[in-house]
Amino acid sequence: MLPSDSLKAIEIPVGSAEVAGLAVAAVVLVLTLGSLVAAGLPLITALVGVWIGVGTAFALSTSVEMNNATPMLALMVGLAVGIDYALFVVNRQRRLIIDRGLEAREAAGRAVGTAGSAVFFAGLTVLVALVALTVIGISLLTTMALVAASTVLLAVLVALTLLPALLGLIGERIVSTKTRQKRQAKSEEESHSVADHWAKAMVRFRWPVILGVVAVLGLGAVPAASMDLGLPTGATANTDTAARQSYEAITRGFGEGFNGPLLVTVESASGAAVDPQTLGAVTQLLQQRNDVVAAVPVGTSKDGAMAVLSVIPTSGPDDDATADLVQALRAPSSSIAQEYDVVVGVTGFTAIGIDMSDRLAEVVPVYLAIIVGLSLLILLVVFRSIVVPIQATVGFLLSILATFGVTTAVFSWGWAGWLVGIDTGGPLMSFIPVIVTGILYGLAMDYQVFLVSSMRESYVHGYHGPASVVHGFDQASRVVVAAAVIMVSVFAGFIFTHDVMIKQMGFALAIGILIDAFLVRITLTPALMALFGDKAWWLPRWLDRILPDLDVEGDRLLQMLTRREDGEQSPRPDAVGPK
């Protein structure tokens, strides 16, 4: 027996690939933080947040309708941001211990007061992007967005509450004596040699870098022009699966349209009962269409006001001809509606998939416009600059278009499909573009905040032009790269599941982070910032007066602590003067 795609058991596709992704994240944490104890904290706090968030989602699934992609999306996003946010706080504490010689508990408090505020803002951007998905008005998408947003909120709360408590419990063991001695023996330039050389190269060759990155991202975005949205069917399943074999068996025996029957409703425009003669005539007209194989009455309502027919199209569920048939039958000007004064509706799994795809294709540009507007407004307030928000937003648009292009080339065109375990191309999941756009926007702004705020800090403390870019990049790039690698490894772990929805989502998020973090933030951003120089921080005086000062990096807190220790106004304690 060959079960069809609709008879597949719902399963949560978590397996060895996801564990491998966590293992890669653990290795990156050890290399970045230099300690098993320190590396274990982000993993523990992320798992706690995910356990609460996903567990609550499963508990609510008895009363709130959700598909199997909903908890998996929450799991993916919760793990990634949970690890990253904890990494930012733990890394800042270790820097304060090693570079400034502070006690562990004092360093933990300062880390939460500085990096913690940046984590709060970073989490807020992801929350805004996810909650904004509810304006689309599709219940399935709203549920996915709210469940994922709640997991992100938990990740932020855990990073700001449970993590400091664990840091206090571990105490001085967060940094070994050997690490302290080794770090103190190195100069700052030696510890950031790779980042320093990279930043100087981006600054020196800024025009070739800018043109090269834009060309690569533009080329990667080309396939996005032919992006096809839909829902997975047996036609797009791998050839060795029961769903694909069942689909092909039905196609050979009866025709492709039998894999996606349509339910057609017929109602009298006057509200009266549909008489048998009218129903028979409508059925006959449907059977005479060239794009219909068969039309069979299924039944009528108790009052006779509505009749239902099963209509088998000649084309498959994913074909454009089937979508054209659905639109033609629904049209008020159709020959059936005009001749018999009836209202024709079309539903069923195939029609619902077509409707969802059309609706989501319409809202993607609108959602992108919302994201662009939010990006410009939020970054304007954070960085108090005109250039930085525009640079960050343009970079995000380039990366998201390239992400859509690469994902289309792999899953629709079948390019290098063997790498992700597919042998047949098909449409992308209808909600992939909006979900990926929302999540990538939040994560891209995270990296923008941590990287560019460090450049601004260097500018404020005496560095100017390209020097501020290089120095700020040295300070922040290591943790941003580590965070991006962790994100990519966690998302990539979901590519090798059997569920095509999770596979596409994991790939799009992994490739999106890879593109945005390493091509846009680490490569394009320092080149653009060096191109504008000190003008990157220009802001009209009238705008400077009305904008709130969020102090995302907690600079005022550190100045207050310095005054308390030194008894006088002084620069930020970890600042280094110009060379």
Image: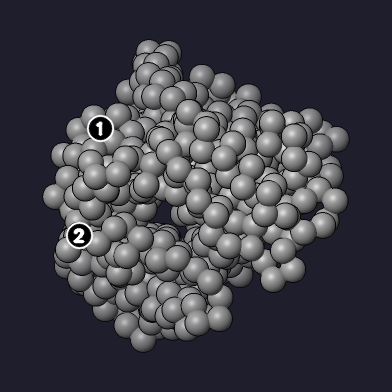
Find numbered disc 2 in the image and state the secondary structure of the residue it sits on. loop
Instruction: Count residues near mark 2 (Cα–Cα under 10 Å), then give few for <14, some for 14-19, many for 20+.
Output: few
46 to 534, vertically: above or below: below
Where is residue 1 shown, x and y percent of the image? 17, 63
137 to 179, vertically: above or below: above
- Is 126 in front, or is 366? 366
Q: Quadrant of the C terminus?
A: top left
Question: In the displayed structure, does residue 538 sit left or right of residue 487?
Answer: right
Of mark 2 and mark 1, the one earlier in the sequence is: 2
The residue at the point 81 percent across, 37 percent down is: 543
What amino acid is at disc 1? Gly
Residue ID for mark 2 = 2
Question: In the displayed structure, does residue 36 sit left or right of residue 73?
Answer: left
The residue at the point 48 percent across, 28 percent down is: 290
Residue 414 numbered mark, or none: 1
Can residue 32 be seen in this snapshot?
no
The residue at the point 55 percent across, 54 percent down is: 297
Q: Quadrant of residue 71?
A: bottom left
Instruction: Count residues near mark 1 (Cα–Cα under 10 Å), then give few for <14, some for 14-19, many for 20+.
Output: some
Where is residue 318 shown, x and y percent of the image? 41, 39
Q: Foreground mark, 2 or 1?
A: 2
Q: How is the image coloured?
A: one colour
